[in-house]
């Protein structure tokens, strides 16, 4: 794995600055003996920020730096190098790389989205521990707890809701803990005799899914269930539940978790699995990232790789509203009869311009089989040129599954071309627009499979048509597990994810945003009025679907920042049980993030216990 040169530079700078720190630079209170400072100290309900008298002294930070082997970093803002102008090499470097998800992930203050209108704005932590091993994490957790600091935990940095980003915090950054190891026969610790050995892969918490796909699929010819976006962090996605393109066949990433190592708030490094700390194990499987402790390592089941992965693509535009209704009706007939099965996932977009965009994938069908499935729909469209035009060529096919994530000659993927980057660090063309995006609004809801049947189908079609008058809707079929094999459903029901996922045929996602607009980014501007109008359109489209599915569940990591009933939406009937796990493993609320379990006890900035 490559090392982070920018991070090393910050570390060197920090060591220099700590060594030369003039006493005058310290807050007055930091110079007082601890007993005297206590009088100035914040009450137990309030965490300590850099402006508070109880903020750790320079000596304390120096001791932490020593304890973590020199891996304590000062965290400059992402665009910090541009503060004095755009001429410096540092500024040019960051501007050149803002659309590279791997570069963003390599920065301690990097976030994969550049903010969310009226919701959150990226802000650098004061310091980060760039953890190399569990001992570094233990030292950081102890330090944060003892000094009552706001603690943030970041892996891949792909939180849409900014839950790995907190102003005035100490960050535990797992990026460098990225080793991947394959096992032929893994038995979780303490489970011998209770569980059969299974093939598995262990991953450091900071690895990204492409690191696992390369090791497990490209090199070893097996399958691991992870995320669709290659640069998402393994630990964050598993704790989200986690869907990949082929989840309709293989379920959520969380359902494949066999074991994790977790540093809890009391700084114990626990090995957590079905036999040891089973409640914490269950909560880690979809209970949301950043709420339970710092995950340092995960072990996931690997599966036999299907021979083929494939896709279907293209865009059809209806010439009139009534033709569009007819197209939707025909598509959902086809979906219910031919696609609602373990083979087909990913998405269609129901467009506000009366278009239907196909971006579907499949597993387990050879090229001829994949084409045969779609031909009747393609023929039906071709037979009515007066009603439909094909604006992007329609097609379907498949290729050897082992080459799906292979970067060699893969024109669907964009490589990280920075010197020293591994050749397999690639991202999908289709994900490019999201890199650094500034979000206007985002919402998601699970659509029950019952809507596909009988009279309810008409309601679904009407609601989709009505919603699409406001905004295009993505239907992510791989994020609703109705139609999946029974074993896949059973494994997902053993996780903390809202059980609604197993009854839904799709997750509807309605979202939009603009180009990167990071704080301090030269030339970036957000037209707030236009962005707000866009947000209202998204809300209106979502409301049209929510009238059909009242109290719909929503996927924790791809959801509305402003969802007022998030506990029920993300976890349904599981929320009380998750609260109990939180109370037993993190009673003081060291691990808090926006709309995470237990966050209702804290102010929005995570500094004040309510
Ligand atoms: C561009 C993009 C594409 C996405 N694609 C998909 C997709 O295909 N499928 C899908 O299911 N989801 C997807 N998501 C959502 C994504 O899975 C979640 O946001 C996930 O939590 C990101 O994990 P991360 O480590 O990359 O992010 P981070 O922002 O680093 O972390 C997310 C959360 O997990 C916590 N966390 C991270 N590491 C640890 C750790 N080691 N221990 C404890 N807590 C930790 C953080 O504190 C934070 O609360 C996508 C998001 C984006 C922005």
Image (cartoon, rainbow, N blue to C red):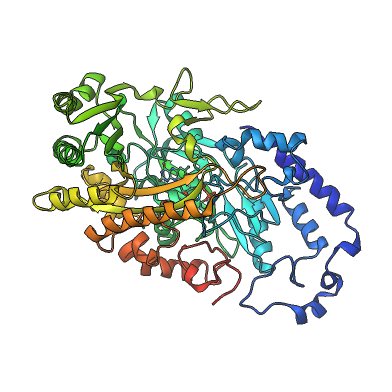
What x and y, as percent, mark residue 504? 24, 51
Examine the rendered structure and indicate whether residue 409 appears above or below residue 490: above
What x and y, as percent, mark residue 33? 85, 75
Q: Which residue occupies 86% across, 70% down? A: 31
Question: Residue 261 or 92: which is nearer the viewer?
Answer: 92
What x and y, as percent, mark residue 167? 64, 60
The quadrant in which residue 176 appears is top right
Examine the rendered structure and indicate whether residue 69 appears above or below residue 279: above
Question: Residue 531 or 407: which is nearer the viewer?
Answer: 531
Q: Which residue occupies 77% across, 35% down? A: 87
Q: In this view, does 239 lie to the left or right of 351?
A: right
Quarter the N terminus occupies: top right
Examine the rendered structure and indicate whether residue 277 appears above or below residue 69: below
What x and y, as percent, mark residue 246? 32, 36
Q: Which residue occupies 43% across, 47% down? A: 512
The quadrant in which residue 341 appears is top left
The quadrant in which residue 217 appears is top left
Q: Residue furthest left?
A: 454
Question: Residue 513 or 80: which is nearer the viewer?
Answer: 513
């Amino acid at each position: 794995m490559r090392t982070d040169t920018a991070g090393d530079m910050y570390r060197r700078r920090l060591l220099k600055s700590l060594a030369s720190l003039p006493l005058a630079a310290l807050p007055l209170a930091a110079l007082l003996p601890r007993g005297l400072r206590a009088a100035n100290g914040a009450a137990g309900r309030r965490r300590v920020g850099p402006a508070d008298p109880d903020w750790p002294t320079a000596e304390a930070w120096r001791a932490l730096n020593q304890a973590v082997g020199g891996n304590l970093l000062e965290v400059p803002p992402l665009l910090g190098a541009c503060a004095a102008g755009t001429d410096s090499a540092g500024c040019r470097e960051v501007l050149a790389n803002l659309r590279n998800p791997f570069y963003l992930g390599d920065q301690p203050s990097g976030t994969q989205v550049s903010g969310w209108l009226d919701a959150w704005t990226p802000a650098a932590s004061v310091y980060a521990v760039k953890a190399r091993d569990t001992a570094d994490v233990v030292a950081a957790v102890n330090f944060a707890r003892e000094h009552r600091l706001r603690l943030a935990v970041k892996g891949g940095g792909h939180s849409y809701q900014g839950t790995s980003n907190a102003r005035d915090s100490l960050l535990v950054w797992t990026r460098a803990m990225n080793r991947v190891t394959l096992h032929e026969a893994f038995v979780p610790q303490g489970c011998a005799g209770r569980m059969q050995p299974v093939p598995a892969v262990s991953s450091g918490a900071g690895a990204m899914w492409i690191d696992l796909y390369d090791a497990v699929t490209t090199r070893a010819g097996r399958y691991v269930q992870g995320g669709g976006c290659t640069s998402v962090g393994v630990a964050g996605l598993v704790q989200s539940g986690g869907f990949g393109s082929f989840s309709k066949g293989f379920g959520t990433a969380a359902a494949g978790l066999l074991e994790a190592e977790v540093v809890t708030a009391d700084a114990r490094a626990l090995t957590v699995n079905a036999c040891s700390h089973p409640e914490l194990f269950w909560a880690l499987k979809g209970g949301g990232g950043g709420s339970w402790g710092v995950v340092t390592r995960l072990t996931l089941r690997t599966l036999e790789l299907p021979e083929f992965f494939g896709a279907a693509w293209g865009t059809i535009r209806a010439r009139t509203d009534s033709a569009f209704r007819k197209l939707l009706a025909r598509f959902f007939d086809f979906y219910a009869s031919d696609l609602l099965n373990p083979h087909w996932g990913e998405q269609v977009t129901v467009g506000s311009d009366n278009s239907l965009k196909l971006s579907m994938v499949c597993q387990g069908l050879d090229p001829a089989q994949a084409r045969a499935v779609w031909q009747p729909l393609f023929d039906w469209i071709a037979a009515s040129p007066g009603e439909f035009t094909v604006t992007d060529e329609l097609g379907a096919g498949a290729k050897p599954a082992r080459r799906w994530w292979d970067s060699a000659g893969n024109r669907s993927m964009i490589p990280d071309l920075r010197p020293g980057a591994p050749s397999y660090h690639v991202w999908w063309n289709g994900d490019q627009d999201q890199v650094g995006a500034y979000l206007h609004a985002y919402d998601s809801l699970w659509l029950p499979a019952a809507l596909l049947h009988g009279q309810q189908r008409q309601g679904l079609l009407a609601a989709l048509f009505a919603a699409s008058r406001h905004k295009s809707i993505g239907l992510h079929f791989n994020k609703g597990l109705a139609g999946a094999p029974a074993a896949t459903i059973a494994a997902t029901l053993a996780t903390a994810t809202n059980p609604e996922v197993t009854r839904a045929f799709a997750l509807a996602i309605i979202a939009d945003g603009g180009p990167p607009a990071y704080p301090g980014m030269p030339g970036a501007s957000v037209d707030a009025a236009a962005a707000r109008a866009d947000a209202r359109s998204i809300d209106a489209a979502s409301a049209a679907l929510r009238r059909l599915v009242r109290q719909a569940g929503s996927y924790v990591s791809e959801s509305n920042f402003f969802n007022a009933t998030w506990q029920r939406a993300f976890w349904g009937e599981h929320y009380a049980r998750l609260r109990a796990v939180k109370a037993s493993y993190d009673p003081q609320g060291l691990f808090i993030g926006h709309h995470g379990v237990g966050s209702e006890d804290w102010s929005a900035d995570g500094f004040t216990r309510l």
